[in-house]
Amino acid sequence: MHGATTHCGYNPPFPLQNGLAMRLSKFHIATTREDPADAEIASHRLMLRAGMIRKLASGIYTWSPLGLRVLRKVEAIIREEMRNAGAIEMLMPSVQPRELWDESGRWNKYGPALLKFRDRREQEFCYGPTHEEVICEFARNELRSYRQLPVTFFQIQTKFRDEIRPRFGVMRSREFIMKDAYSFHMDQASQDETYRAMYDAYSRIFTRLGLEFRAVAADSGAIGGDVSHEFQVMADSGEDAIAFSDRSDYAANVELAEAVAPATPRPAPSQKLTRVETPEQRTIEEVGAFLNVPARQCVKTLLVRGTDGVVALCLRGDHELNEVKAAKQPELPGESVLAGEAEVRAATGATPGFIGPVGLPQDIPVIVDRSAAVLADFVCGGNVDGTHYTGANWERDARITRVADLRKVVAGDPSPDGRGMLSIARGIEVGHIFQNGDKYTRAMNVAVLGEDGKARTPITGCYGIGVTRIVAAAIEQNHDERGIIWPDAMAPWRAVICVINPKNDPAVDAAAESLYRDMTGRGIETALDDRGLRPGAMFADLELIGIPHRIVVSERGLAAGRFEYRGRRDAESRNMDRDALLALLG
Ligand code: ATP
Ligand code: MG
């Protein structure tokens, strides 16, 4: 039937758009020159200016056609690597019934980030912030035997968390896309193997995306079991501080990084304990300057609320309390909260700023940081307003209930693995992997038959990637004053051909068209900028959007048989003939 009407030599029109090609005149590009008022960080600013996202409501964004192209690239790489690692894709609903969350105990525990609502029958639901409950419901219905395990399911799906402070655009939004995966195992050895496989898959994903990242040991907090790693994209605007060794692959969230005990023992006391007047000096800086003593020779004392009255935490003056470490001390109720001024006064008779370990009432435990514990002849608060002590010494003058690791590590500290020194950098958490043990499977009654025919509770791991956050994180790491600089793997198009044709010379259009076909034919994803903009405006747009490779076709170049090529990071353009160009991009 077809054959009868086909013309001889019929040449089908080159598609307007397909997987690789796009005429920008037929696409939706909506860039702006002005910086948006409420965007604090570069990625947020540039995503708005490039027209990748549009805000619908606080923390809720539309992805424009341009933004979606980038998002799809990220998804495709994640999907491929998850499959390579043996995970099986599925799709779970966003809307989840309350009953499941009651079973896990999280309906009330998850907190205000859980968006709850009712349907017309007054049934309660939430919009899923995560899917442990739903996957456990699936698993308990589908998995019967140990033979079906281990198994890892994953999905790429929209989550909602009613974040207290949505900010930085899609970096911390309320609605966002996550890749979440859940694995089920009969034993720990199997869990360890899958955890490793996911760790490796994550490393490949972020490497392929062209990001500078680190896998860091993380504080899994109240959510998971013991083992947990975060994948952090390094960027100054990141919310997390990461400590890493300059000589090994040790890396940990600062919340978790151990401050090792100083190698040198505490010197013997050489000074007399002396009370000195410090009428107006409360802070370590003020006291140190007044008494001409460096901060590292002072002890600062914080009173926090313990399970049974206040607890004193002592640190070297130049160090800061790590609240996560403090919260783990057995005298504290699982969180570290400073005592109020009235509580401090009731416990010591003095106000904060003049508190110290010397002469504290016997019933107040004194937990001393490792570095503070090796000080001798130190300065500390006098427990009488307007006074401090000089020449104070542990044991002789002040009690130690326990020495503990309480402080935040600082740059220059020895690495806890014994190799190298710590540096501190900021990062953006783009992925997080956990081992959950039987936390969810036990609560949700997931059971499979073991080899011996008896019912067993499997253990689980969960593995998340912030798909939408990755796009913002990549921009934080790759931009300049002119705009975004996409790594090739994430770019909306790898290359763009700019048509400069003020006189409407058909030869220019034809040359551009032919190059466009050649590049696309070779699998190079290419946009043709045929919008007819003036060169300055066109280049500014394309630089803002961040396309990695730009080729200019103009009358002048054409006369010399050349194209003008410029990489997004290059300072200048180069003239190239077609073969050199295709070789460079192919
Ligand atoms: P964060 O500490 O940043 O709030 P989280 O520990 O709550 O993250 P997970 O529950 O482990 O995050 O979720 C997996 C991934 O989802 C995170 O690593 C992050 O990349 C992404 N993510 C979490 N919350 C948000 C959000 N509000 N906006 C965008 N991405 C998010
Ligand atoms: Mg969170």
Image: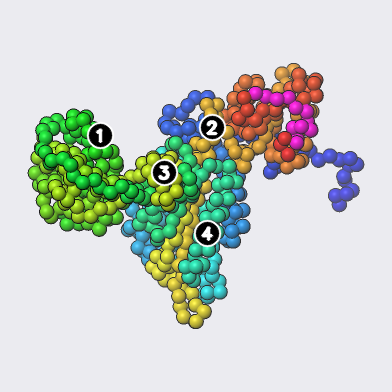
Q: How far separated are the C-alphas under marks 3 and 1? A: 23 Å
Residue highlighted by disc 3: 422
Distance from mark 2 CB to nearest ligand 1 atom below 8 Å: no
Vertical position of residue 296 compared to residue 82: above or below: above
Q: Which mark is residue 196?
A: 4
| Amino acid identity at mark 3 | Leu
Residue highlighted by disc 1: 294
Residue highlighted by disc 2: 479
Distance from mark 4 CB to nearest ligand 1 atom below 8 Å: no
Q: How far separated are the C-alphas under marks 2 and 4? A: 33 Å
Q: Is residue 44 visible?
A: yes
| In this rendering, the label closer to the viewer, 3 or 4 | 3
| Amino acid identity at mark 4 | Arg
Say which element carries label 2. Answer: strand
* Between discs 3 and 1, the one toward the N terminus: 1
* Between discs 2 and 4, the one toward the N terminus: 4
Q: How far separated are the C-alphas under marks 3 and 2? A: 27 Å
User: Dots 3 and 4: beta carbons under 8 Å?
Assistant: no
Q: How far separated are the C-alphas under marks 2 and 1? A: 41 Å
